[in-house]
Amino acid sequence: MSFKYDAIIIGGGHNGLVAAAYLARAGKKVLVLERRHLVGGATVTEELYPGFKFTVFSYVVSLLRPDIIRDLRLPEHGLTVLPLESTLTPLPDGNYLYRDGDHYRTLRDIARHSERDAGAYDEYSRNMYFMAKAVKYILSMVPPDPTSWNPRQWMDLLDMARHFLNLGEEQFYMLAKLMTMSSADFLQQWFESDPLLGTMSASGIIGTFLGPRSPGTAYVLLHHYMGEIDGAFRAWGFAKGGTGGIANAIARSAESFGAEIRCDAPVAQVIVKNGRAVGVALENGDEIYAHTVASSLDPKKTFLQLVEPDELPSDLISSIRKFDVRGSSGKVNLALDALPDLACMQGSSQFGMKARALAGAISISPSVDYIERAYDAAKYGEIPQRPFIDAIIPSVIDPDMAPPGKHVMSCFVQYAPYHLNGGWTDKKREQFGDIVVDTLAQYIPNIKNIILHRQVLTPVDIERIAGITGGNIFHGELSLSQLFFLRPAAGWARYRTPIQGYYQCGSGTHPGGGIMGTPGQFGAHEMLKDLR
Amino acid sequence: MPIPTPFHPRTAPLCESYEWRNWSGYLAAGLYEPTHEREYFAIRNSAAMIDVSPLFKYEISGPDAAKVVDRLITRDISKCRVGQVIYSPWCDEDGKVIDDGNIACLDENRFRITAADPNLRWFQDVAYGFDAHVTDVSTDLAALALQGPKSRAILKEVVSGIDFDSLAYFHLAHGRIDDFPLTVSRTGYTGDLGYELWLRPEHAEALWDRLVEAGSRYGISPAGMVALDIARIEAGLLLIEVDYISSHYARIESQKSSPYELGLGWTVALDDSDFIGKKALGAEKEHGSPWAFVGLHIDWVDLERLFNKVNLPPQVTGRASRDPVPLYKNGHQIGQLTSRAFSPLLKKYIGLGTVLSQYAAVSTQIDVEITVEYGREQGKATIVKTPFYNPPHKRA
């Protein structure tokens, strides 16, 4: 059988595009099929209100791997990462905690809340550097299956064992704690003040359906330190043009290598003949044939929707069915008539510290209790009255995001339970939006007067628009039980599937979500081994 | 002790870093904020105000002004129309570069030259015997560079009497802001869309205030020398006393450079105009130059390899480095890297340097000295074309 394409990638999100770019770079004929009218998936920028560009879902870039940036020449294709240097935690009593690139000033501000915490800050950072270095090793490998008898995988496992034994006692124990503790408990080994613990522990719950006191969340903290080990090359910040700027750069790179990208082309099914994937059927009935097919969609779609159940072993079907993809977060995007004013800081909003705070992250996370209470509500299917919000004002960082003098604000909100009691309705969505705006108004008094347009996204909306089952931003919980050789299912963590010629390359595979690109990159590498 | 520039009353309160540099005897902000990254990205993504008042400025006027300029610079000034600006080096009789700068043709008989070093004595000596007058106008003019993709939109709102859509790259025009006049040249040291504003020092603060007011809607920011240094390396622009030494200050002959050796061969108009150094440069062109000025791309993967030997991530300075390091080919030194920076925009470790001309071809693989944890190592580097960054909006 002769195929028009070597590979078809289902889904034009960042991982699908990365996979396509690597395949095309290796000289393969690749077609990317995207359901929507634009590429990016959850990595999109859309002008939803005239002149105002919303970084609709994802909003910062922190993990995009340096080797991918380099291999795919992303800066040449338009990727620019603008600095996002500060985190402001405004507090209900009018005080604040502010941290930025000015090390000693940051320590002084932490000391206002706890002198002891200021003293421990550098020690903590140093430990996290070692932890990130230890874990980077895992992120850079295709997960070996510990039950496999394949000698190559055994070599990988031995090498991994050696890596961890070489860490030294102190770091090894630290890593064991990091893998098992809650983010709050882990941080309390160093810190005591509410705002610092609250804001830092929030890094451990973003995207998960867990609270800062839930075991396992400490591991998620680590992702925020990954950039440290890449030196000057780190890609941490706000992508020019919003995260759609990242997807567009990858798409242009893929096209420059010869990949073909087709939008408005939803795939209905993978065509399997005699246990082998040979192409896809589009929703409009067209059939396109290829030597291999890869899905960058979430595991539920990859295994339960795109292929018939009788093509897969029943144990795999049942583990994928149990794969936890409950969405826990929502997004509120605002078009603003003016610059938000921060009640907690005096002075000019144009230059100086307040201006820098407005150009950084604004974290509504005054304490661990505050976030844990929000989780309590969500746990029982309710919208929390006071949610954790991670807000940025992209137009302050990149003036092209809004008309001159106007602004856009991106608010990541947690928790918004996918399974809301009574289900999500239009009314509940607006109620959720009101709660977010009311919460912001406590710290940004002018916010209600300057809103021109509001987009509220619940996990159900994320599922509907971005096509991610459960609206889970990571394509599946980043809990230990769903990581490494267990992601997305035991025995199938190496980007392959039981169907010959059918691959996975989405965030539901190792090492998981965040705009990292590794699943797409590794997926492509595995495909190339077979395409040779 | 350095003294304030005309913009100092406005720049000083914004200089939170307290990091001032001495630029030709003036206080120049190294950076305003605690870190330079946002200032750098103001140059590349919005608009940055850079106080360049410390530049030396000279005016050559009189019936023979064009003749004096023509004798002085290596380029042919007769091709420069009124309202145009050209960049050129000027040389001594041996064809070695004294300095480089912009020459603005203000009038048929009046030129303004910007320079990095004091040049009054040299310019007056060159003008000897001509019906022309050379004056130092350095303190008569304040100068502010407004650089970045949003600079035009801001100036359109602030300046009257100039059609910015038709003001071409390396041209100037005269306009007004409220009640004071200024000259705007579409020039700069960043390789981006940008302008330099020339005005009487007493209007400096008013200019600053008007730019800040209008620019707030476009993300305007002051930027210091640290950010500028990265931008100029990306633009492949050389810096006197860093990338080359003025022949007037060189202590030994080998410290001097000809325009050919600085990548400025394109400015040497051997065919029509007569200028100081022409004879020597004619001979050099015929016989070839021993040295060449090149752009370098330092290999990041190799850098990771070197640092990995000591279990560290690559340590590169966030700022541009002006400490020269040797360049090697097969273990033999072939030149030096004089400026280097990690480009936050291009995500590449880049540099400018001088190599023996036989190694100057683009794509030549050479080695660069890298200090890894106190030890001297050699990392891989490739000769590449400059500028490293050359956006279409620079000339559009």
Image (cartoon, helix red, strand yellow):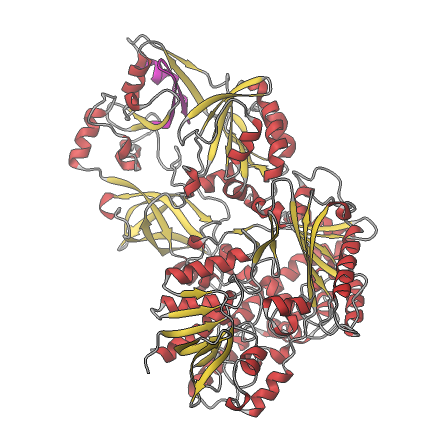
| Residue A480 figure quarter | bottom right
Above-or-below relation of A424 to A482: above
Residue that lies at the very extreme toward the right in this rendered image: A93
Task: Confirm whether the magenta stretch covers residue A419.
Answer: no
The image shows residue A24 at horizontal and vertical percentages of 38, 67
Q: State left or right for residue A363 relative to residue A323.
A: right
**Quadrant, the C terminus of chain A:** bottom left
Above-or-below relation of B167 to B58: below
| Residue A428 figure quarter | bottom right
Above-or-below relation of B251 to B304: above
> Magenta segment range?
B99-126
Residues B120 and A143: in front is A143
The image shows residue A412 at horizontal and vertical percentages of 68, 60
Residues A276 and A140: in front is A276
Residue that lies at the very extreme toward the front in this rendered image: A284
Whether residue A101 is visible to the viewer of this picture, yes or no, is yes
The image shows residue A172 at horizontal and vertical percentages of 60, 74
**Residue at x 49% of width, y 89% of height:** A148
Task: Confirm whether the magenta stretch covers residue B123.
Answer: yes
The image shows residue A32 at horizontal and vertical percentages of 45, 68
Whether residue A71 is visible to the viewer of this picture, yes or no, is no
| Residue A208 figure quarter | bottom right
Q: State left or right for residue B352 relative to residue B19.
A: left
Q: State left or right for residue A370 relative to residue B184.
A: right
Q: State left or right for residue B7 relative to residue A337.
A: left
**Residue at x 35% of width, y 13% of height:** B109
**Residue at x 76% of width, y 60% of height:** A430
**Quadrant, the N terminus of chain A:** bottom left
Above-or-below relation of A28 to A449: below
